[in-house]
Image: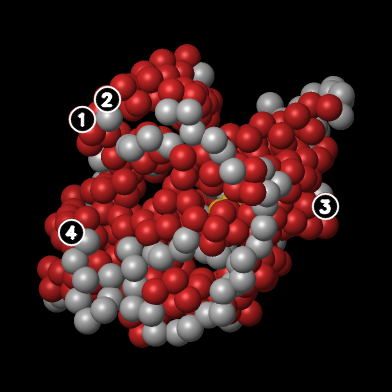
């Protein structure tokens, strides 16, 4: 593993600390609505969804601190946003919420197995990127349509959110989604005042709600396996590449062990999965965090501590979602996924020779069909790989 040499004079320690705070704020506010949407879709009650948000916030915060401190690198960990989108697209699985929790535990076991048995990682790497990205794009499509349908369902609530996002997508892209969430919070506050709705103080108290897991074939094949693949292909692998682009060689096995253990610890509390940060990783690892690359690990620790603090407000964020007017929060979640959807589509169809299998994969995933109790994400992978094999067989 290597750490780049310093390239500029020392900056105040407050600089990497602030970079970590910004990393956590952007990462949390940009996608917490997606996490709550996904957990609710697979059967979590509002209390269980809030517990899940708290669980992933605490586990990824501790994982950031452990990895950044131990390896003196700005390694940051995040919840699996594409994984949460997958939950939202999958919906209730055979066995309900307890089976979803069982699927989270199996996902954790697969991540740990990837660390202990490199052949599993190699097997995942053999899934064509176009197929994996097409599956993700199909999963994301229904969520990305929410801002559009929301403009019709509740124009006065959604228009301020969309306009805020559009303005800051031009002026400050990093903050576009967080500020869209602020606009949504204002819409919620105005709605509560207009309707004279009292907020139960009990909703604001963070709590862990444990669920005994059950295991069903439909949940394991239709949820755990796609969740593992999406987490690896869309988060862990790009996260390693982004860190490498800044000169850091992230230790693969320890990173998978820490995120696997973190996912396992959070699973029964409703946490779906944590992984290496991808897009937000650059905020802590770039020269903007600190000119001296040897000190940027402080940003990684600061990110983790900030996630722990934000976790304390998880119940309040969940309450905001619960009290929001129709279509407002789904619109924020959809806007948060626009960039991921665009990137997935581009990677899926980039190679003309892989385009047809990718299109089939995308369409099956977007269809939302369920067969034999197994969700569309799994059948999308199967269909894409079958079509790809049929089109490529006999070719060199």
User: Residue sitting at 66 percent across and 31 percent down?
Assistant: 22
Cβ–Cβ under 8 Å for marks 3 and 1: no
Seen from the viewer's position, the closer of residues 14 and 40 is 40
Q: Is residue 189 visible?
A: yes
Q: CA distance from mark 2 to mark 4?
A: 27 Å
Task: Check whether the beta carbons of the residues at disc 2 and disc 3 lie within 8 A of each other.
Answer: no
The alpha-carbon separation of the residues under discs 4 and 1 comes to 22 Å
Mark 3 or 1: in front is 1
> Tag 1 or tag 3, which sits nearer the N-term?
3
Residue 392 at least partly seen: no
The residue where tag 4 is placed is 367
Q: Circle 4 sits in a helix, a strand or a loop, which is it? A: helix
Q: Residue 241: x, y in percent?
A: 55, 50
Residue at (62, 66) in percent of width and height? 209
Neighbour tally class for label 3: few under 14, some 14-19, many 20 plus, Cα within 10 Å: some
**Residue at the spot of label 1:** 152
Image: 245 above or below 125? above
Q: Is residue 362 left or right of residue 37?
A: left
Q: Which residue is mark 2?
A: 155
Q: Is residue 231 left or right of residue 208?
A: left
Pick whichever of labels 2 and 3 is earlier in the sequence. Answer: 3
Q: CA distance from mark 3 to mark 1?
A: 48 Å
Q: Are marks 2 and 4 in contact (CB under 8 Å)?
A: no
Crowding around mark 4 (Cα neighbors within 10 Å: few <14, some 14 to 19, many 20+) is some
Question: Which comes sooner in the sequence, label 2 or label 4?
Answer: 2
Q: Which is more N-terminal, label 4 or label 3?
A: 3
- Asked if the residue at tag 2 contacts the one at tag 1, i.e. Cβ–Cβ closer than 8 Å, the answer is yes
Of pointers 4 and 1, the one earlier in the residue sequence:
1
Disc 2 crowd rating (10 Å Cα; few below 14, some 14-19, many 20+) is: some
Q: Nearer the viewer, mark 4 or mark 1?
A: 1
Residue matched to label 3: 69
């Amino acid at each position: 593993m290597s750490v780049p040499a310093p390239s500029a004079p020392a900056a105040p320690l407050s600089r990497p600390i602030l970079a970590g705070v910004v990393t956590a704020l952007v990462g949390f506010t940009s996608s917490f609505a997606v996490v709550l949407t996904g957990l609710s879709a697979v059967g979590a009650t509002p209390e269980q969804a809030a517990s899940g948000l708290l669980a992933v916030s605490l586990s990824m915060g501790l994982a950031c601190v452990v990895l950044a401190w131990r390896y003196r690198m700005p390694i940051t960990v995040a919840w699996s946003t594409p994984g949460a989108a997958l939950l939202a697209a999958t919906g209730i699985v055979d066995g309900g919420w307890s089976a979803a929790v069982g699927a989270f535990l199996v996902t954790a076991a697969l991540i740990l197995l990837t660390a202990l048995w490199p052949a599993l990682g190699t097997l995942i790497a053999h899934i064509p990127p176009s197929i994996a990205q097409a599956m993700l794009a199909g999963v994301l499509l229904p969520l990305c349509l929410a801002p559009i349908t929301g403009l019709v369902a509740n124009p006065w609530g959604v228009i301020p959110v969309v306009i805020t996002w559009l303005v800051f997508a031009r002026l400050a892209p990093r903050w576009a989604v967080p500020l869209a969430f602020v606009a949504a919070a204002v819409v919620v506050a105005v709605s509560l005042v207009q309707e004279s709705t009292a907020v139960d103080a009990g909703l604001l108290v963070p709590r862990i709600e444990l669920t005994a897991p059950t295991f069903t074939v439909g949940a394991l094949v239709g949820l755990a396996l796609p969740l593992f693949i999406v987490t690896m292909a869309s988060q862990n692998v790009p996260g390693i590449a982004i860190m490498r682009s800044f000169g850091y060689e992230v230790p693969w096995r320890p990173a998978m062990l820490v995120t696997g253990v973190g996912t396992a610890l959070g699973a029964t509390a409703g946490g779906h999965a944590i992984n290496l940060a991808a897009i937000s990783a650059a905020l802590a690892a770039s020269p903007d965090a600190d000119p001296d690359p040897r000190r940027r690990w402080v940003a990684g620790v600061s990110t983790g501590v900030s996630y722990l603090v934000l976790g304390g407000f998880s119940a309040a964020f969940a309450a905001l979602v619960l009290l929001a007017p129709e279509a407002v929060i789904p619109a924020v979640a959809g806007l948060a996924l626009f960039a991921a959807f665009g990137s997935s589509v581009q990677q899926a169809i980039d190679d003309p020779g892989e385009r047809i299998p990718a299109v089939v994969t995308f369409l099956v995933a977007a269809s939302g069909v369920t067969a034999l109790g197994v969700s569309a994400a799994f059948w999308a992978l199967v269909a894409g790989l079958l079509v790809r094999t049929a089109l490529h067989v006999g070719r060199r």
